[in-house]
């Protein structure tokens, strides 16, 4: 730097002015071009962290793919769809059976509701009031989630009973039952069957050819003058 200034043949005061102007220009360029990008590295690190988190989620979902495929095969190879008139009874019996096995007391229930908006499933919803200990209630919820017919818990509200020994509350359960596929019937063909063509012939729609006109016998021609009649014909 000093050698460069010496080649310019500047006085000491001019050198100080050039150095001062250079420093000011350097600071201005840093303020305009460098300092605004100090936070870019932090944003890059956050983006990288989010991308790694998304990649981990995708890898976990891919690892769970065989489990879901097995579940789909089990559902596809299941039994025939339950008749619609038996679904409500089967749903209530499943709830009561699981509650009995888990030690949960059902103190009340509301009216069952049915939704048929889904083209493939019938959804039945049932709200029950329960009284149980914490461990028994957890076991009941686990058993309900593991039951068939895609049973799940839609709503749950709990509070301790007055002695604060057990839990009371309301549970809304939902079960989806597969609809019976509608059988498609093809309309009967009213066209009468066509008679089979004789063997060795080709059946066509052309009309038969007209019959040749009948030939009428012609009158006998008179013999020529001077001609002799035949032996078996008398002379005239």
Image: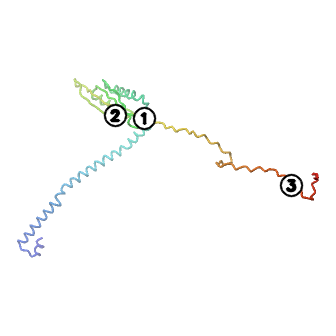
Q: Is 8 placed above or below 29 here?
A: below
15 or 207: nearer the eye?
207
**Rendered-image quadrant of the N terminus:** bottom left
CA–CA distance between discs 1 and 2? 18 Å
Please tell me whether mark 3 or mark 2 is closer to you in this view.
3
Badge 1: few (under 14), some or many (20 or more) residues near its Cα, within 10 Å? Answer: some
Mark in front: 1 vs 3: 3
Residue shown at the point (11%, 75%) measured from the top left = 8
* Residue under numbered circle 1: 179
Residue marked by disc 3: 221
Q: Which quarter of the figure has residue 122?
A: top left
* Furthest residue in direction left, as rendered: 13
Figure quadrant of residue 92 = top left
Q: Is residue 205 left or right of residue 179?
A: right
**Residue 195: x, y in percent?**
64, 42
Q: Quadrant of residue 228?
A: bottom right
- Name the residue nearer the viewer: 208 or 5: 208
Up-down relation of residue 125 to residue 219 (above or below) = above
Q: CA distance from mark 3 to mark 2?
A: 115 Å
Q: Which of the colour schemes (rainbow, by chain, secondary structure, one colour) is used?
A: rainbow
Residue denoted by label 2:
152
Q: CA distance from mark 1 to mark 3?
A: 97 Å
> In the image, residue 194 lies at what x, y percent?
62, 42
Label 3 neighbourhood size at 10 Å, few (<14), some (14-19), many (20+)? few
Q: Earlier in the sequence, mark 1 or mark 2?
A: 2
SS type, badge 2: strand
**At numbered mark 3, what does the secondary structure look like: helix, strand or loop?**
loop
- Identify the element where label 1 is drawn: loop
Residue 222 in picture, x, y percent from top left: 88, 55
N-terminal of the two: label 1 or label 3?
1
């Amino acid at each position: 730097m000093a050698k460069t200034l010496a080649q310019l043949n500047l006085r000491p005061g001019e050198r100080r002015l050039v150095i001062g102007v250079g420093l000011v220009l350097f600071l201005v360029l840093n303020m305009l071009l460098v300092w605004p990008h100090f936070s870019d590295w932090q944003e890059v690190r956050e983006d990288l962290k989010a991308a790694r988190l998304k990649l981990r989620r995708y890898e976990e979902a891919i690892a769970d793919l065989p489990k879901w495929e097995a579940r789909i095969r089990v559902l596809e190879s299941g039994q025939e769809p339950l008749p619609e008139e038996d679904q409500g009874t089967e749903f209530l019996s499943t709830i009561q059976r699981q509650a009995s096995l888990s030690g949960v007391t059902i103190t009340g229930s509301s009216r069952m509701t049915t939704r048929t908006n889904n083209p493939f499933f019938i959804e039945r919803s049932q709200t029950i009031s329960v009284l149980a200990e914490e461990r028994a209630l957890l076991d009941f919820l686990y058993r309900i989630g593991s039951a068939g017919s895609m049973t799940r818990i839609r709503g749950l509200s709990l509070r301790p009973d007055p002695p604060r020994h057990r839990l009371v509350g309301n549970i809304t359960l939902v079960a989806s039952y597969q609809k019976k596929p509608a059988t498609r019937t093809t309309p009967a063909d009213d066209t009468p069957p066509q008679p089979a063509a004789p063997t060795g012939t080709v059946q066509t729609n052309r009309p038969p050819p007209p019959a040749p006109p009948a030939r009428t016998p012609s009158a006998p021609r008179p013999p020529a003058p001077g001609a002799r009649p035949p032996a078996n014909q008398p002379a005239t």
